[in-house]
Each structure stands twice: as structure tokens, then as C-alpha cells.
Amino acid sequence: MKKPNILFILLDDMGWKDLACTGSTFYETPNIDRLSREGMSFTNAYASCPVCSPSRASFLTGKYPARLGLTDWIDMDGTCHPLRGRVIDAPYVKHIPEGEYTVAQALRDGGYAAWHVGKWHLGGEAYYPDKEGFDVNIGGCSWGHPHQGYFAPYGIETLPEGPDGEYLTDRITDEAIRLIRSHDGEKPFFLNLCHYAVHEPIQVKPEDRERFVRKARELGLDQETALVEGELMHTEDKAGKRVMRRVLQSDPDYAAMIWNLDWNIGRLLHALEESGQAENTVVIFTSDNGGLSTSEGSPTCNLPAREGKGWMEEGGIRVPLLIRFPGRIKPGTRCDVPVTTTDFYPTFLELAGLPERKEQHCDGRSIVPLLRGEAMPEHPLFWHYPHYGNQGGVPGSSVRLGRYKLIESLEDHSLRLYDLETDFGETRNLAEEKPELAAKLLLMLHGWQRDVEAAFPSPNPEWKPLDNRE
């Protein structure tokens, strides 16, 4: 059987509900929604970390961030780490660890052309995509977002400058389309397309913004009432600063950014069809973490999921996941089985007809049976974020098994247990009502932490409760 092309589309900071097909009533995504109609939608898809770099490394290696030691976004100059609150952030690795055999290397060694286009954020030049198994690197560097903005000149060292005013999402898509159209077909391709969108700065084309300014006005959405004050942040340097949480999707700039992204996804899908490669290409669309809803302008809202990027709650880790593979996935199907970032590596190998590499992707499992509509045994998913998030989140670890999710605070080791089937918003803590279940999940979580040799925050001897500060 002919090996399929693999087109992996990874968004930056897109929330689980930032698509019309996943529940948004303000954003418009007709082209991305098409992937849902023509493929499978996953309703319980997760990123392996609530921030970007760890999830990206997890995808490439098939390992949990805690096992890699890469547990927070990579702060190359160290100006933002460690943060201090009740505890001090755990140390972490700032690049893909040496000796990892990435999914790009595995596919390339299996006969694939491997291309990377867009954001990387996994270390300095010695760890760029061309050093990690990719034949091509366009736009991938140490940056976590467009430092000079979305309009050229970009200043991205691995992306030749475009004309002044060119829009980055358009340009990244142009580069991907060029690769697809120039492909000779002798080898199948693996295209790792990582858009910088929708990470801030939220910058959009004026004509796209006007569309959603009008829409917000017509719907009576008031920007001033879209944000509400929330809980206090407990990091030492941000004590007393209130978290502003967006309570509805109403930001015309963010909506316009998604609208442009959707238009570009439409162009990409058209290029696949025009080149005659659509029928033999599996397309995967997902995000590296939850939507940004509690800081930096709080451009989106994840409700009814709680919180957002940088938090252990569902809003920080639940993401959209759509997979289309003509003739192999039944159109318009839905899968409710929980899946996570580590699962992509073994899934891609199975789709490509290549042997498993269990020692490498030891934390993932192939979800090909789910794509065929088959059942898979229940198994736990884990998270470990021993850091204070820039967005207000506090250090924590978590496990989900079936319908239940347990979060352990790494500040005071308090527990929160939720039934996600009846309480998606994580509003009712069942830890005292179901102590045996909480204890079982905690034992499972601690066993996993030992297995991956997880790093933990250290006590902060200078910490004082907010009420005791002068």
C-alpha cells in the first residue's frame, strides 16, 4: 500500500472552543470546519502541557514533558525564570534533550521527505529543525512568537524577508503550498506546519477586523463587560495583581486573526486537491495548549472549560483535534476517547506502515484503532507543570482516568477531584466525597512522577502569605 503523506497543522494558543465546529458562535471557520465534516473530531483531546515548548517537544519525541525535563516554555535569556511564590519554579531543560530520535527522523529514515514550516521554539541554533530530522526548515527558530509582529519585516533569521506589510500567516501558508506543489511524488512527505498564529501580539488585517467589529456590534457584544476580575495571583513578583478572565468570545481582533488563519487553511487544502495529493494525505489539525483567556489581553474565552493557557484546568490543556484521511476515516465522525500529544508519534508510524519505536515514544499509543472506529482500553493521561504560569496558574500535577481528573497543587499538596462528565467546568471538588478514588489517582500520579523522574519546585524561604505582607 502506498504510504500516505502526513500534514500536521499545529496552532499556537488556539483554545478548544475557538472553532465554529467546536462551539464558537462568534468566530468563523468554514474551511477548518470542513476537516470536521470530512473526518473525525476528538472531543477529549489534550496538549501534554498548558504552555507551548513542552507540548512541541512531546509531539516530536513521543514522551511526556516531565520525562524530557522540558516542562516550561523556553525562556532563552532566563529573564522570566524562575518565578517565586510559595515555592520556587523547578529548573528545566531549554532544548530538545540530546539523543532523542524525533518523529521527523523516524519518518525520514522510513522514506519520507520531512519539512518544517513555521514556529519551532525548542532551543538555539544547535537544536533547530534541520538538526532534529527535518530536510527543510522555513521559519523555525528560537522565538516563541513574532517579536517584530505579524507584518513584514519579521526579523526571523530562518525566513527570508517578504515585502513590507506582508502578513506572516499568509507567508507561512505560501511556503507550505510551495513545498506541496513542488513535490515530485517520489517520496511521501511529512509537513510539520506550525503557525505562529494565534499567539499574541494580536495583529490583523484592517479589512478582516472590520468584519468582526460589525458582527460584535450587531450581536450587542460589549467589550467592556467581556472581562471580569478573578482570583489573586500568588507569585512573589505579581502579588496583589488581579487576573482578568474573559467570559465570552467577543474580541474582533482575535476573531479576525482566526478568520485569516481559516482562509489560509482553505488555500492549503485547495493546493492539496489541485496537486492531486489530497486523497493520499492525512491532515491533522490541533493546538499546542489551551486558549489565552486570563492575561496578556485575554483575547479568547474557553468557557465552560475553566481557565486557559498556563493553567492545569481544562481550559489550559484541552485543545481542538480534527483528523481527515479520505477513505480511511469515516466522514463526520466523533471520538470521545481522551487522547494527548504523545500519541501522534506512534500513530504516524502506524499510518506510514513503519515499525514501532517503543523505547522512544514510550508515553504515547497509536490511536489508529480510534480512527477506524474501534474501541481502545482505558488508560491514564498525565500532566506535570512545576512552574508559575505567566497567565496566573500555579504549579501542579494532574492525572485523568476515564471521567475523573485529579489535580495536586505543588504549593501545598491540596487535592481537587472532578467528574468531567458531569462537571466539565471543574466547579465541584469531590476529593472529600470520594476519598478512596482520590487516593487511588494520587497513588497513580505519584508512581508516574517517580517513573519519569519529574522535577519539583523547591520551598521559598522568603515567602509570606499575602495577608502578612507589609
Image (tube, rainbow, N blue to C red):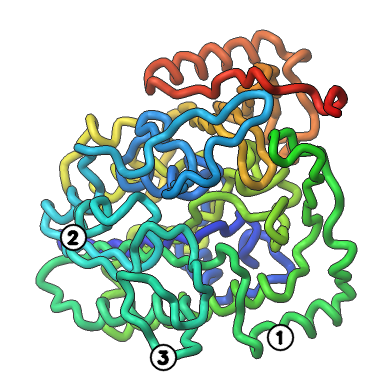
Position of the N terminus, as image quadrant, is bottom left
Q: Give x and y (percent) for residue 40.
A: 48, 57
In the rendered structure, which amino acid carries the disc numbered 1? Arg
Q: CA distance from mark 3 to mark 1?
A: 25 Å
Q: Earlier in the sequence, mark 2 or mark 3?
A: 2
Q: CA distance from mark 2 to mark 1?
A: 42 Å
Q: Nearer the viewer, mark 2 or mark 3?
A: 3
Q: Earlier in the sequence, mark 3 or mark 1?
A: 3
Choose between 13 and 353: the one closer to the eye: 13
In the rendered structure, which amino acid carries the disc numbered 2? Lys
Other-residue count near label 3 (Cα within 10 Å), few / some / many at <14 / 14–19 / ≥20? few
Q: Residue at x 79, y 23 (%)?
A: 465
Answer whether labels 3 and 1 touch (C-beta < 8 Å). no
In the rendered structure, which amino acid carries the disc numbered 3? Pro
Q: Residue at x 64, y 17 (%)?
A: 461
For label 1, the residue is 211
Residue 337 visible to an observer of this rendering: no
Is residue 300 found left or right of 191 in the rendered image? right
Q: Secondary structure at mark 3?
A: loop
Q: Secondary structure at mark 1?
A: helix
Other-residue count near label 1 (Cα within 10 Å), few / some / many at <14 / 14–19 / ≥20? some
For label 3, the residue is 163
Choose between 75 and 167: the one closer to the eye: 75
Q: Residue at x 44, y 76 (%)?
A: 154
Position of the C terminus, as image quadrant, is top right
Q: Nearer the viewer, mark 2 or mark 1?
A: 1
Choose between 147 and 260: the one closer to the eye: 147
For label 2, the residue is 3
